[in-house]
Image (cartoon, rainbow, N blue to C red):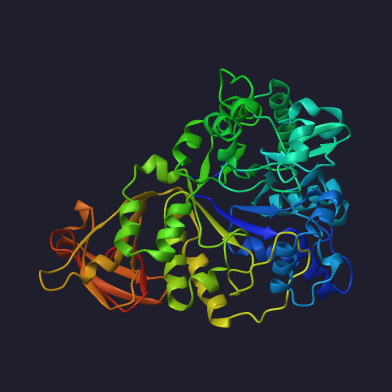
């Protein structure tokens, strides 16, 4: 298989619910090892570079029992699944009992078969890793209690929401510094040298089963964050930061293995510096959902190496469905933007069909929803238009745009271009609720003196334009609310 592209497209699958849907359609149990070839063909045909099987590891019976006593979770389960039954709660995929593929999903052999099927089609596999915590029935709790942040019997008596006694030892429950502790997990000690070596061994084992990992809440294990969260309980700070110790140890064996961080709190650059290939761009998501096109554009003025290390998305399992948060034409405009920006692009299974119900990760079954045929057709055009080397390995550049003293609607435009060898593309998105006009300024001097054809790969229309005018004056663009152009640009005499 060729090396990873610079700007990969990743497809997240909620593995348990997806297999349940396939089983229902087939009238028999389908696991990772028995997925029909036609399903893999359909995924490959969309042009993804990798599939993230979210939630394959063995889930915790102890965690399930705890979650069934949580009224807030039960209310969320019934919101998503009105006919919820206890057996639908298969446990949180982030309450890991063991890093072994759950037998109900096909076990290690099933994952190996799925990985081989995808590799035959040129796709890689990404899996989860949860660095901050494990389930209370994880083997480390009894075999290596020193790997955890510990408490005292007094802590367990006075603060049972934050500490729990297991087998005569008191453990801190997992947490981040801004919220109460999670009741179903135990907090790992990022500073413990034995834990770090155990983590390296665990990831080496995981790396034998996939091509990259998405690290849950990765910033929680940064030494500064861990020290602030746990204070004196954190113990002596090591000389090397957690990820700076872990990632190089894996990369030494698997240089092409990808590390992807779920990250917040403006710590993305820090995580990139410690070895992460890509970090979540939650700030871009928030600006695209709530702010203006100009706010989005300001975000995109960051240095290119930083941007290439981000993960762009408008939906994943932690966020509301895009069809709910980005309804109608705004969702299509946001999708065009995300799929044509530098960095990794993340798409979520169900996003193309317009699913609106965000499924709690505990649930192994989801409600039936009627696909949005227009949205399905739109994503088919968009994915087809962005296949290939130009948007995967090309060079991206933000384009200037201008208007007139009495018309500054151009500020609604998001504009950028791509080049690779002789291939060129221009993206113009009216990311606003009103009609917009303006001039888009292309950066290529060799436009001058030739006529050019602009093929809109989304609209199926072609236009002829004079290169000198495009370069020296600008390309005039007028778009209605949330409308887009995705132009492939080529000389008329080519």
Identified at 58% across, 81% down, the residue is 372
Decide: is 206 above or below 440: above
In the rendered image, residue 163, in percent from the top left (x then y), is placed at: 74, 39
In the rendered image, residue 21, in percent from the top left (x then y), is placed at: 77, 70
447, 270: nearer the viewer: 270
Quadrant location of residue 117? Answer: bottom right
Quadrant location of residue 201? Answer: top right
Q: Is residue 187 visible?
A: yes
Identified at 73% across, 22% down, the residue is 194
Left/right placement of residue 270 relative to residue 446 reads right
Identified at 68% across, 79% down, the residue is 369
48, 108: nearer the viewer: 108
In the rendered image, residue 491, in percent from the top left (x then y), is placed at: 28, 62
Q: Is residue 465 visible?
A: no
Decide: is 153 above or below 493: above
405, 10: nearer the viewer: 405
């Amino acid at each position: 298989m060729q090396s990873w592209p610079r700007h990969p497209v990743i497809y997240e699958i909620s593995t348990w619910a997806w297999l349940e849907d396939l089983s229902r359609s087939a009238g028999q149990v389908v696991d990772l090892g028995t997925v029909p070839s036609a399903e893999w063909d359909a995924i490959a045909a969309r042009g993804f570079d990798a599939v993230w099987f979210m939630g394959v590891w063995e889930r915790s019976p102890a965690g399930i029992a705890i979650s069934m006593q949580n009224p807030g979770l039960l209310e969320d389960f019934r919101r998503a699944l009105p006919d919820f039954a206890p057996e639908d709660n298969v446990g949180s995929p982030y309450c890991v009992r063991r890093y072994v593929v759950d037998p109900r999903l096909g076990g290690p052999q099933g994952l190996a078969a799925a990985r081989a099927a995808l590799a035959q089609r040129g796709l890689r596999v990404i899996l989860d890793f949860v660095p901050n915590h494990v389930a209370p029935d994880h083997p480390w709790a009894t075999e290596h209690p020193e790997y955890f942040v510990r408490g005292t019997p007094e802590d367990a008596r006075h603060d049972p929401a934050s500490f729990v006694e297991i087998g005569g030892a008191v453990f801190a429950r997992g947490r981040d510094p801004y919220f109460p502790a999670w009741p179903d997990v135990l907090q790992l000690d990022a500073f413990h040298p034995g834990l770090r070596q155990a983590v390296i061994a665990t990831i080496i084992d995981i790396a034998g089963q996939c091509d990259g990992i998405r690290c849950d809440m990765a910033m929680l294990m940064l030494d500064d964050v861990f020290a602030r969260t746990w204070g004196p309980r954190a113990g002596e700070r090591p000389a090397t930061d957690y990820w700076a110790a872990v990632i190089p140890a894996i990369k030494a064996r698997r240089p092409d293995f990808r590390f992807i961080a779920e990250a917040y709190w403006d710590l993305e650059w820090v995580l990139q510096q410690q070895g992460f290939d890509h970090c979540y761009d939650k700030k871009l998501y928030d600006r695209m959902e709530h702010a203006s096109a100009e706010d989005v554009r300001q975000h995109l003025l960051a240095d290119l190496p930083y941007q290439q290390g981000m993960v762009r998305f408008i939906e994943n399992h932690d966020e509301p469905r895009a069809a709910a948060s980005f309804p109608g034409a705004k969702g299509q405009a946001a999708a065009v933007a995300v799929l044509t920006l530098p960095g990794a692009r993340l798409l979520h299974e169900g996003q193309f069909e317009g699913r609106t119900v965000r499924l709690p990760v505990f649930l192994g079954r989801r409600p039936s929803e009627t696909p949005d045929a227009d949205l399905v057709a739109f994503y088919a055009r968009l994915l087809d238009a962005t296949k290939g080397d130009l948007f995967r390995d090309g060079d991206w550049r933000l384009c200037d745009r201008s208007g007139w003293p009495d018309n500054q609607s151009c500020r609604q435009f998001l504009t950028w271009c791509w080049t690779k060898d002789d291939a060129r593309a221009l993206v113009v998105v009216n990311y606003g609720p009103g009609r917009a006009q303006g001039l888009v300024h292309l950066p290529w001097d060799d436009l001058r003196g030739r006529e050019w054809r602009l093929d809109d790969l989304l609209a199926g229309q072609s236009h002829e334009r004079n290169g000198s005018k495009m370069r020296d004056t600008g390309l005039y663009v007028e778009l209605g609310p949330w409308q887009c152009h995705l132009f492939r640009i080529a000389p008329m005499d080519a």
